[in-house]
Amino acid sequence: MASAKMIFYSEASWKESNQSYQGFILLGVADRPHLEMILFAIILLCYTVTLVGNTTIIVVSWLDPHLHTPMYFFLSNLSFLDLCFTTSLGPQMLVNFWRKSKSITYAACVAELYISLALGSTECILLAVMAYDRYAAVCQPLHYTIIMSHSLCFKMAAISWVSGFSNSLVQTVLTLQLPLCGQNRVDHFFCEVPAFLKLACVDTSLNEAVLFSASVVFLLVPLGLIIVSYGYIVAAVLRIRSAEGRRKAFNTCASHLTVVSLFYGTAIFSYLQPPSNYSRA
């Protein structure tokens, strides 16, 4: 409730300091309209697959008692997170690709900014937690059920969600306090912090420093923990004499590694840049 109030007050002050327009224009690829329908089709397909796939994972994990394990508990959390994340961005992007007007209201932009960053930050921590779960399963199989107790799993999931939404609250409040001096054209497909730092007509050094520091904490630290975990996992797997056993162990980690590679590659490119790169040219 406190978080919602802080965002509401920040949004109100933001509106007050930027009364010369009623919303924002998300430029995206507006200068290349021939790409819009192609992107519309691709995003619609990806969004549909994401909805069906993640919903299936959640339902099956909940209905099948054999899947009530730490791995599927975290996988269900990740699937629910991905459902929320894609839904916070996908529909608005599809609407903007379809129509000529690329506008978005203040309320929608603030919600998109806060929710997408919160869920993205949460996923960073959750992927590190899942790497630890795989480490315990492969490297400590005899003690796995003791190490990954129900209480520990819930605590680790809760820490992921709370830390992610807390980080987004800080970034959103700082961003909404920036005066935009009537600039309402966002050179992006959706509302996010780096795009808005480019619109500010004041010094954004503090915002850039906070964003960069948060990116290190939420991107590099979890990624480092994932790399260390998989270092131990690889060493343990190589000690398995059976080829079938090694293949089975690697298969349990393959999907997680794929998600980590795609997610962290995109996130690091977007957020872990030198502060000067966020500034307006």
Image: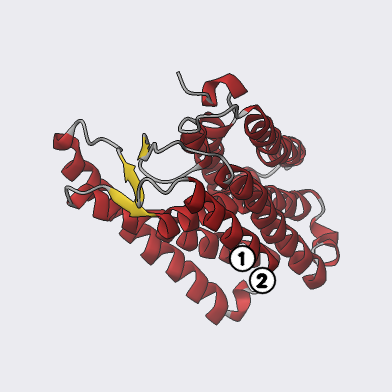
Question: What is the x, y in percent for residue 142?
Answer: 83, 60
Which quadrant of the figure contains the C terminus?
Answer: top left
The circle drawn on residue 4 is 1
Q: Secondary structure at mark 2?
A: loop
155 over 200 or under it: above or below: below
Which quadrant of the figure contains the N terminus?
Answer: bottom right
Q: Residue at x 21, y 31 (%)?
A: 31
Residue that extends furthest to the left in the rendered view of this protein: 34
Residue 56 lies left or right of residue 92; in this view the side is right
Q: Residue at x 75, y 65 (%)?
A: 153
Mark 2 vs 1: CB contact within 8 A: yes
Q: Secondary structure at mark 1?
A: helix
The circle drawn on residue 61 is none
Question: What is the x, y in percent for residue 129?
Answer: 71, 52
**In the rendered image, is residue 32 in sight?**
yes
Question: What is the x, y in percent for residue 122?
Answer: 63, 53
- Quadrant of residue 264 within the rendered picture: top right
**In the rendered image, is residue 238 in sight?**
no
Q: Residue at x 61, y 24 (%)?
A: 275
Question: What is the x, y in percent for residue 17?
Answer: 50, 46
Depth check, front residue: 167 or 17: 17
Crowding around mark 2 (Cα neighbors within 10 Å: few <14, some 14 to 19, many 20+) is few
Label 2 is placed on what type of residue?
A: Met
Q: Residue at x 52, y 24 (%)?
A: 279
Residue at numbered disc 2: 1
Label 1 is placed on what type of residue?
A: Ala
Q: CA distance from mark 2 to mark 1?
A: 5 Å
78 over 223 or under it: above or below: below
